[in-house]
Amino acid sequence: EVRVHKEGKIYEMKFSRGKVTQPMQVVGDTDRHGTEVVFKPDPEMFEITEYNYETLHTRMREEAFLNAGLRIHTIDQRPGREQHDDMCYEGGIKEFVTWLNRSKTPIHNGVIYMAGQREDSVAELAFQYTDSYSETILSFANNVHTPEGGMHETGFKQALTTTLNAYGRKMNILKDGDEIKGEDYREGLTCVISVKLTDAQFEGQTKAKLGNSEIRTLVNAIVSEKLEIYLEENPAVGRAILDKALTASRAREAARKARESIRRKTALG
């Protein structure tokens, strides 16, 4: 059922399995405005017709983070399972990163945020480093989660590695023998990338990966320009990030040498 509250009247239209069962008609008066959609799962289409509140709550929380200032209520009125959540995040994806790091220890204060636009495409990024050893990158295109990444993640990773390498050389933090790879710069990183574009091209039916090459160029340009400025203005943060990457690089190299040593001993045995 779709109900539209407009100009003091409630207009209602009903559908079932793709066909109109009730044409649009006035069903009452109202002092509200907006659109209301009521739906139930069809047992012929879905094996499971019972809603999981936590699944819906998690998805709506993502929407609230990705659209700064938007207020979303999730309410479960089923007897014995009543619960509700009220979500509104003025800080948008910056608060998303803080929330993701709620049980971790950041190595620098504040979340690094940057955004930019080219023609009808918009991109924003927020990230923060913690003392953990894993990387967490969540990317979205038109508010759709892209778990397999795509061009927006590729552009970010390329620019992050290039910019941090250049900064490390410029500040003499990196020496000639230091070999830092992208994976070293992403150790302990928590990042949220959100892009919005009119002609999103997803790879596969599940929209798991974004294929627009122009988004890679946009994200790369934003990070390359604005991260360099940020590091110049916040040298302590830059030092902390480079120190962590150097430690990750040395640990990776030590692990490689240990594996090679074990292989040689095994071969000799």
Image: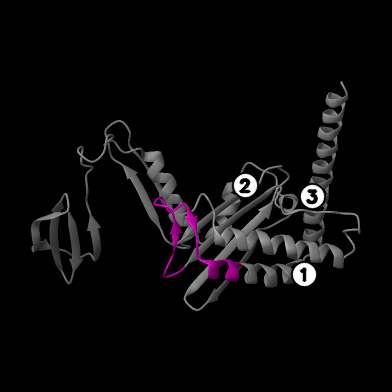
Report the quarter where the N terminus lies: bottom left
Q: What is the crowding at mark 1: few (fewer than 14 residues within 10 Å), some, or many (at least 20)?
A: few
Task: Pick whichever of labels 2 and 3 is earlier in the sequence.
Answer: 2
Q: Are marks 2 and 3 in contact (CB under 8 Å)?
A: no
Would residue 61 be found to the left or right of residue 28 on screen? Answer: right
Q: Amino acid at mark 3?
A: Lys
**Which residue position is annotated with label 1?**
233
* Residue found at the far bottom of this picture: 119
Percent across and percent down for residue 241 are 77, 55
Q: Height in image: 191 above or below 256?
A: below
Q: What is the crowding at mark 2: few (fewer than 14 residues within 10 Å), some, or many (at least 20)?
A: some
Q: Which mark is residue 219?
A: none
- Cα separation, mark 2 vs mark 3, equals 17 Å
- Cα separation, mark 1 vs mark 2, equals 24 Å
Q: Amino acid at mark 2?
A: Asn
- Cα separation, mark 1 vs mark 3, equals 19 Å
Q: Residue at x 59, y 53 (%)?
A: 97
Q: Height in image: 103 above or below 154?
A: above
Q: Which residues are magenta?
A: 197-219
Percent across and percent down for residue 221 are 64, 72
Percent across and percent down for residue 143 are 44, 59
* Residue found at the far front of this picture: 268
**Which residue position is annotated with label 2?**
101
Q: Which mark is residue 244?
A: 3
Instruction: Decide whether residue 154 is among the magenta residues.
Output: no
